Image (spheres, grey):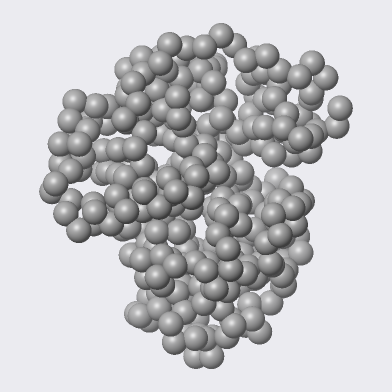
Amino acid sequence: MRHFIDFSDLSLQEWETLYQRFEELLAHPGDFRDAARGRALGSLFYEPSTRTSFSFQAAMLRLGGGVFSMNDPGVTSVSKGETLKDTIIMCSGYADIIVIRHPCEGAALAASLHSRVPIINAGDGGHLHPTQTLTDLATIIRLRGGVSGLRIGLCGDLKHGRTVHSLVRALSSFEGCSLSLISPRELAIPDYLRAFLRSNGQRYVEVTGLEAILPQLDVLYMTRIQRERFADPSEYDRLKGVYVLTAGKLRGAKKDLLILHPLPRLDEISADVDADPRAAYFEQARLGMYVRMALLMRLLEQPARTLPPPTAGHPSHTCHNPLCVTARETYLPALIHSGFCAYCDKEVVL
């Protein structure tokens, strides 16, 4: 069973095939209106969402399929203490494919262990958001012709930003691009991601200022400071508004700069930027629906499976990350890869 938990679940050849289908869907959407006829998408959103939830629902409907949704766990059996495992086993008996967003890191991987049907990760806490990465890559390639040779700046909350984590990992699969990671020191990329960049030979720099580096960038990926990820509200109040992109600041930027944002935005891109032809974030959101149509079509090619026996874990593995799904769903098998928790990517001490 193929799931989509991280961009690395695709080979580059598979990504190119997916991108080609994305272009076909853009050009001739009516040709695919029956591609998912009779199929059902289970949409499980344990956290708030607008674009990702709507775009998946719209994608399935435009392919001729149906959708059933959980957008408020408080009115489901989750509020009674139902485990993720039981929810997924139940839902995978009704759906042909499941998309899940969850506050715990590694929840999508955990769900895939107990599903009869493909699982798509729509965001697991502050960890990963791979379908946003598909959207980001498709937007860059469509509007800039490719990734190679580009200098890409990622700005804002790089510590908690799951869209950033996924995009950085994916960009390391492409040759010839360089990354400028722009954040306050307190919100820099996590250690595991820095180790990933080094082990993959990715060219990158970490800086704290936006304006000085802005003229050098081909792509600027702005992100919001994520209030919901802060344990201390005063720390959020101290850091919010640290980066604000305005029309005035863009005067020295490249004429063909591509300005992206996974949205929602707060104050990090002022409204006067919206009219700039370099601002592509609303087009980026629109393109996300077509990318997700292509992904749904690819994964729906598989038949449902019989659930395998429970996966055995490492007997001495304990993940000490309180945000890891294993802290909440304590029945999960302990899984490690090269000294890191397979669910949340944090280092494990054996």
In this rendering, the count of numbered labels is 0
Residue in front for this viewpoint, 246 or 34:
34
Which quadrant: the C terminus? top right
Residue at 44% x, 87% y is: 255
Residue 284 % position (x, y): 37, 62
Q: Residue furthest bottom?
A: 252
Foreground residue among 315 and 86: 315
Residue 214, compared with residue 103, is above or below; it is: below
Quadrant in the picture for residue 216 = bottom right
- x and y percent of residue 176 in the render? 58, 68
Whether residue 24 is visible to the viewer of this picture, yes or no, is yes
Specify the farthest residue to the top. Answer: 309
Q: Residue furthest right?
A: 350
Q: Residue furthest left?
A: 30
Residue 291 appears at what percent x and percent y? 34, 50
- Quadrant where the N terminus sits is top left
Is residue 228 visible in the rendered image? The answer is: no
* 171 or 102: nearer the viewer: 171
Residue for point 46% across, 31% down: 3
Residues 122 and 167: in front is 167
Q: Residue at x 27, y 27 (%)?
A: 40
Vertical relation: 22 (above or below) 113: below
Q: Is residue 204 above or below residue 322?
A: below
- Left or right: 12, with 213 as reference point: left
Q: Quadrant of residue 275?
A: bottom left
